[in-house]
Amino acid sequence: MSPVQENSRWPRVSKFTLSACAATVAELVTFPLDLTKTRLQIQGEGGSRQHGGNVQPPKYRGMLSTALGIVREEGPLKLWQGVTPAIYRHIVYSGGRMLAYEQLRESVLGRSEDGVFPVWKAVIGSMISGALGQFIASPTDLVKIQMQMEGRRRLEGKPPRVHGVYHAFTKILAEGGIRGLWAGWVPNVQRAALVNLGDLMTYDTVKHFLLRNTSIPDNSICHGLASICSGLVAAIMGTPADVVKTRVMNQPRDSNGRGLLYKSSTDCLVQSVRKEGFFSLYKGFLPTWFRMVL
């Protein structure tokens, strides 16, 4: 049987395989931005930290200084610390989102009589499929964030929390059970839905605006500008939920798996704004935006 016939019989398997390969490459290329984003989102957590009677200033203040600080103090390869669960997460999320979206498009929401899938249905389908994919992949996000913070913990003289992907999963299971693997899933799902909403709506709007009102043809420049704008809107909409997700997932927990800093994602949101100001919800915004554009 020819490859073309094989693919026509198993279209979703083929798409999932290609999606997994693309996700792996994309994650490897952009992961240093994700690590930098995570460190920035944890930076200054809880407002002023007291150490010997003095207020501790943030160790790093921006995207470049954070990335350079990691290279200088931990080594260049530490920019990829936590990349393994990130690849797992990207494969599960991208594959799950794609399969869920196709199922919603073909079997639930349905196309119009002329075979066109309306924009409003695409928006709903994208939000639901993104949220579902993120919920399934949430445990890998939890492990990724905890591994990303290990380098900082060593520099602060704290004992290592996890020693690898397998150890992280077993440790979380032992302390919090199955439920513990989904710590922080609420802001995680909210972020995915908001990012998909902002990305899809803005991309199509900007692309059509450029084609109607400028001399730019439907080429890579048009798509690049639309991608930059859609990434900006998606980052604006999704970063607050992402900050809350990162902090909830990274917080220390008791022997029963309960968080010691925040009771819930809402509590984390309120504490962050009260102690650090509204714009603390946009820590890590630049690497988030750049990563979406790339």
Image: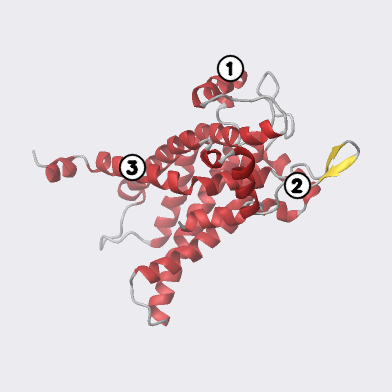
Which numbered disc, 3 or 1, marks the residue closer to the eye?
3
Q: Where residue 220 sits in the image (x, y, percent)?
A: 35, 68
Camera-nearest residue between 102 and 162: 162
Residue wearing tag 2: 58
Quarter containing the C terminus: bottom left
Give the residue displayed 40% in from the left and 56% down from the top: 121
Q: Which residue is mark 1?
A: 174
Report x, y in % for residue 3.
14, 42
Answer with left or right where residue 142 lies relative to residue 275: left
Q: Is residue 83 left or right of residue 259?
A: left
Q: Which of the two discs, 3 and 1, labels the residue nearer the N terminus?
A: 3
Specify whether residue 241 is in view: no
Residue, x 47% and y 49% (percent of image)? 30
Residue 269 occupies which quadrant of the picture? Answer: top right
Q: Nearer the viewer, mark 2 or mark 3?
A: 2
Q: Find the distance from the CA under tag 2 to the CA under tag 3.
A: 38 Å
The image quarter in which residue 233 lies: bottom right
Q: Earlier in the sequence, mark 2 or mark 1?
A: 2
Q: Which mark is residue 214?
A: none
Q: Which residue is mark 3?
A: 21
Left or right of 51? Residue 140 is left
Q: CA separation, marks 3 and 1? A: 32 Å
Name the quarter where the N terminus is drawn.
top left
